[in-house]
Image (tube, rainbow, N blue to C red):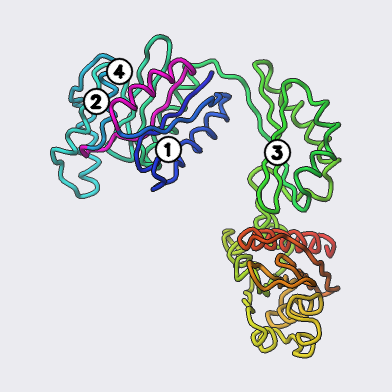
Amino acid sequence: MNTEIITIGDEILIGQIVDTNSAYLATELNKLGISVVQITSVSDTRESILKALEDAGTRAELIIITGGLGPTSDDITKPALSEFFSTNLVEDAGVLERITALLAKRGVALNERNRKQAELPANCEVLPNSAGTAQGMWFTRNGRHYISLPGVPFEMKAIYTEEMEPRFRNRFHLPHIIHTTILTTGVPESEMANRISQWEAQLPPDLKLAYLPSPGILRLRITGKSNGDRIVLENLVKSEKHKLEAIAGPDIFGYDNDTLESVVGRIMKENHLTLSLAESCTGGNISTLITSVPGSSAYYKGGTVAYSNEIKTSELNVSPYTLIINGAVSQEVAEQMADGSRTRFSSDFALAVTGIAGPDGGSPEKPVGTTWIAVASKKRIVSHCYHFGDNRGRNIQRASVSGLFMLLKEIKNCL
C-alpha cells in the first residue's frame, strides 16, 4: 500500500519548526510494510490544502494529513476537509463530552474555542485523541483512505498508536516486514560497500540492504518483506545477517537500537568495572553520552574537561615538560591524561581525548582534525592518532565515537 504524508502549516515552510511528524509516521508505517511514496508540506490556505488532497489521491491509496486542527482562526483544515468530502461540520456529542472531561482533569473550563473542537465533518470516522482536544478523522473516497491528525507531535503519536495502527492491522492485508540493523564504526561507507559488495549482490529478492551513515557510525539495515510465511522470512533474514557479521567482523559494535555508550555501559555493569574520562577537544561530550544511559552511576565515576594546559597538569598530572616538547595534541599527552584520570578517580578504565577541533588552531604538522585518543587500564595504555577533517561539530562527534569504540575494544581485550 502506497502512502503520502501531507503536513499543513506555514511554520514548517518557513523553517520555524522541524517536521518530526513525517519522520515518525514514515518509520511506524514502514514497520507495517506500508510504503511512503511522497511527503508534501503545504501552507495554511484552503487552495493549498484542497490541491494537495486532490494530487495525493492520484499517487497513493492512503493519505495522512497532520496539522491545522487547532482551535484558532488560522487552523482551517476541518473546513477544507468538509469541502473536499462534500459535507458539513456538525457537533459530535460524544467528542464534546470527552473534551470537557479532559479539560476538567487539567483544571480548565470549557470555552467556545474548545467547544468548536467537537465540530467535525459529518461523514468522517472519529479517531479519539486521549492526549488533546483535536480529534483524528478517517475518510474514504474513490477507494482512497484519508486520515487527518493534529500537528502536535505527542497528540499525533497517541492517535496513531491507540487508534490508527490497530485499524491498519484489522482492515488492510499487510505484508510481513522484518528489520535487523548491524552497527559498525571506523569504516567509511564506500569501503564497507566494497567489502560486502559480493554478499550484497547475492541477496535473495525478498531482502534489501540500506546504508545509513552518520559521523563515525555506519548502520547496515537488512529488511525482509514478504507476503509468505513469516517464519521462513525470519530465518532468511537471520541467515543473511550471520553472513554479513562474518564479513564486517571486528567493526561491529552493536545491533538495532544499541548505541556505543549503552554497549559500553552494559559490558562495564555486567563485569563490575568503573570508568573515568579526561576530555579536551570534546569538551565533555563523551561524558554527556555516558551519563545519558540510565544506570550509568553504577560504573561512571566522573571526568575532567581539561581544556587548558594548566588543568592538564594540575588535575591530570600531565608533565609540563611533555606539553612543551610534544604539544597538547600528542600521543604522550593523551596517554598521560588517561593515566592521570585513572589514578585520580581510582577507576578500572580511563578514556582521554585531545585534539584540534577547529576551525582554527591547526598547523602543517598537526592540521585541524588531528586527534589523539588513549585508553588506560590496569594492564596497559593504548593510544591512536586520528585525522577527522576540518568541521568542528563533526570532529567532536567522530572523536567521541572513536574514543568509545577504542574503550569498548580495550575492555573486551582485558576481560
- The furthest residue to the front: 364
Point out the frontmost of discs 1 and 4.
4
CA–CA distance in space, label 2 to label 4: 9 Å
Percent x, y of residue 49: 34, 26
CA–CA distance in space, label 1 to label 2: 23 Å
Point out the frontmost of discs 3 and 1.
3
Vertically, is 202 above or below 338? above
Q: Earlier in the sequence, mark 2 or mark 4?
A: 2
- Determine if residue 270 is in view: no
- Determine whether, in the image, residue 386 is placed left or right of residue 33: right
State the residue at coordinates (81%, 41%).
245
Q: Earlier in the sequence, mark 3 or mark 4?
A: 4
Percent x, y of residue 20: 46, 42
Residue to which mark 3 is pinned: 211
Q: Which of marks 1 and 4 is nearer the N terminus?
A: 4
Residue to which mark 4 is pinned: 84
CA–CA distance in space, label 3 to label 1: 27 Å
Vertically, is 258 above or below 45? below
Vertically, is 364 above or below 204? below
State the residue at coordinates (32%, 20%).
125
| Quadrant of the rendering where the N terminus is positioned | top right
What's the amino acid at mark 4? Phe
Q: What stretch is highlighted in magenta?
A: 45-73
- Determine whether, in the image, residue 224 is placed left or right of residue 241: left
